[in-house]
Amino acid sequence: MIRFAAILALGLLAACSAPQAAPDNGAQAQAVPALLPVVIRTAKGAHRFDVEVADTPQAQEKGLMFRKELGPNSGMLFPMDPPRTASFWMKDTLIPLDMIFIRTDGTIAFLQANTEPYSRVPVSAGVPVAAVLELAGGRAAALGIKEGDQVAWGGCAVSGDKVTTERNFCPSASR
């Protein structure tokens, strides 16, 4: 009887410590977001950013929340289709951001610089916009980006590059 109990205990111990099957990382791997080129034309010249696109309600709700850093030429674009009056806040956003509200003609309607992390105060242009672009806080000032500057993205922004996307914003207004 003691021998049976010892064998049973060893069997249970072996079952509990057996290596688990490796997870299927293909199904769980996080997709690397496709980046979209955005160009802002200012009095100081053109500035290119390669940004993520928040193109679903869930992605727009999350935005850049919980990010600890954002590269100088990175950001996130929030398309508004159809154009609408957009309002953003900084709840659960750890870093300051520049919020750039873009009219349907491609001009910047409103720029809120260095928004305060964690703030629940809404930021809005107060007019319908085609998109909102978020950049690292202070980047707009460093590059001389101002209200009235021209924005384009996709193949329209970088006509010399081969950009494969259905997301092209080719405003008719020009500088």
Image (cartoon, grey):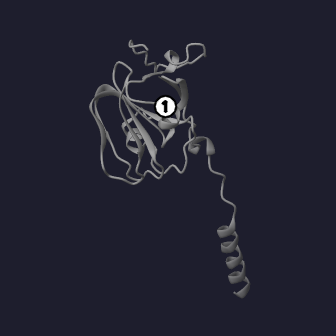
Residue that label 1 marks: 144
Residue furthest toward the bottom? 2
Q: Nearer the viewer, residue 169 or 141?
A: 141
State whether residue 128 is above or below residue 161.
Answer: below
Disc count in the image?
1
- Residue 153 is situated, as x and y percent measured from the top left of the image, at 48, 22
Residue furthest toward the right? 3
- Residue 25 is situated, as x and y percent measured from the top left of the image, at 62, 45
The three-letter code of the residue at mark 1 reads Gly
State whether residue 20 is above or below residue 167.
Answer: below
Q: Residue at x 45, y 43 (%)?
A: 97
Q: Quadrant of residue 20?
A: bottom right
Q: Quadrant of residue 16?
A: bottom right
10 Å crowding of disc 1: few (<14), some (14-19), many (20+): some
State whether residue 169 is above or below residue 98.
Answer: above
Q: Residue at x 51, y 19 (%)?
A: 157
Quadrant where the N terminus is found in the figure:
bottom right
Quadrant where the C terminus is found in the figure:
top left
Q: Is residue 89 left or right of residue 142?
A: left
Q: Nearer the viewer, residue 172 or 130?
A: 172
> Disc 1 on helix, strand or loop?
loop
Q: Is residue 100 left or right of residue 164?
A: left
Q: Quadrant of residue 17?
A: bottom right
- Residue 159 is situated, as x and y percent measured from the top left of the image, at 55, 13
- Residue 146 is situated, as x and y percent measured from the top left of the image, at 42, 30
Q: Is residue 161 left or right of residue 62?
A: right
Q: Residue at x 69, y 64 (%)?
A: 18
Q: Nearer the viewer, residue 149 or 87?
A: 149
